[in-house]
Structures are given as structure tokens and as C-alpha cells.
Amino acid sequence: MQKKSKIILGIDPGTVVMGYGLVEISGSTIQLLEMDILKPGKVEDPYRKLQLIYNTVSGLIIKYKPDVFAIEAPFFGKNVQSMLKLGRAQGVAIAAAMRHGLDVTEYSPKKIKQSVTGNGNASKEQVLKMLQRLLNFKEEPKSFDASDALAVAVCHYFQENSVAGQSGTKVNGWDDFLKKNPGRLKK
């Protein structure tokens, strides 16, 4: 029996706040399944935080049975300790995905913003507004970490389904894209 839809799980890793977002693709339609945050920062023991991240990602995989796992790559900051903690959070999230047999794809923050908004330097607010338009939802997330994770999932969808890959034709801007793909416009 063939699966009719595809589910993508996106993660914005963190030991203080981890965002997650899930989208479902049916044909050329993409819809929001869930976006939320986990706050492992409330836990004192750093290893319990990692266990909580692992268990949460595993639970999402068991609940939604995603086909794909995408995660944001850590950005390079000045604080080495923060980078190490972020790398650990990312590592246990990836380990959970791999434990459940999912392939892992990693995207840089700039690539995610570029893919979702067309601007690699877009603000978190701009990313959220574009996600609200693309996925037709109005509610504000608890944290930008949730919408960032959703952006990771949407970025993966766009990377797998690039315009050039689908139609074999090059487009010049949004107007040209909409003329060539009228079914992709949500009203």
C-alpha cells in the first residue's frame, strides 16, 4: 500500500529551548501539523536535558511517523561553551532520528531563511510572516524557536521540490513563478 502523503520533521536545536515543527505534504499541498517548543533549560542536570531532547524527538517520530528529518546547523558564535552545548543538543536530536531509521538533512540558518523568504538575512519576524502565508495559519508561536523549526521543515520541502526540478523551466521572480504554477497559489 502506497503512502499518500509525506511528513517532514524540522528541529531548531537548543539546550535552553528546542523548537520543532512538522508539515505534511499531499501532492503539491503543504500544511502545518504541529509546531511547538521544548524547554530543557528548566532541567538543572545537563545530561538530563540531553535525555529530554532525545526522548522528545523520539516521541515526535513515534507519534507522527515522519518520512524526513531536517535540522538547523549550529551557527558560529563567540562563546565556545554555548557552541558545545548546542552541538550536543543537535547530536542527540540527530541520534534519535537515526535510531528510528530516518535520513538526516542539515541546513544553515541562512539557507533556511533564503529558502522560506527569498532573503538569507531575513528577520525571525519575516520568516514567521512568510510561514503564516505559506501554511495558512494565524496563531503566534510560543517562541520563535518553534517557527524557526517549522522553517527548517518548509526549507527541506522546497529543497526537495525545487521549481527547476519540477517544471524544468527557469522562473524570473514570484510573478513568473505564479504564472507558471497557478495551482501553487493558496487563497
Image (cartoon, grey):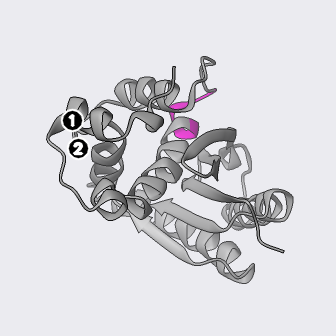
Q: Is residue 170 above or below residue 183?
A: below
Amino acid type of the residue tagged 1 in the rendering: Asp
Q: Is residue 36 above or below residue 164?
A: above
Q: CA distance from mark 2 to mark 1?
A: 21 Å
Would residue 31 appear left or right of 61 to someone viewing this image? left
Would residue 177 appear left or right of 135 to someone viewing this image? left
The residue where tag 1 is placed is 176
Amino acid type of the residue tagged 2 in the rendering: Gly
Residue 73 visible (yes or no): no
Would residue 104 appear left or right of 34 to someone viewing this image? left
What secondary structure is marked by label 2?
Answer: loop
Answer with the quarter of the image where residue 130 lies. top left
Q: Residue at x 53, y 39 (%)?
A: 145
Pointer 1 local density, CA inside 10 Å: few below 14, some 14–19, many at least 20: few
Residue 134 visible (yes or no): yes
Q: Could you say which is closer to the camera, residue 161 or residue 113? A: 161
Pointer 2 local density, CA inside 10 Å: few below 14, some 14–19, many at least 20: some
Answer with the quarter of the image where residue 146 lies. top right
- Magenta-drawn segment: 142-146
Q: Is residue 21 above or below residue 74?
A: above
N-terminal of the pair, mark 2 or mark 1, is: 2
Can you tell which of label 2 and label 1 is closer to the viewer?
A: 1
Where is residue 159 drawn, in percent x and y?
A: 38, 60
* Dot label at residue 120: 2
What secondary structure is marked by label 1?
Answer: helix
Where is residue 24 drawn, in percent x and y?
A: 66, 49
Give the quarter of the figure containing the N terminus: bottom right
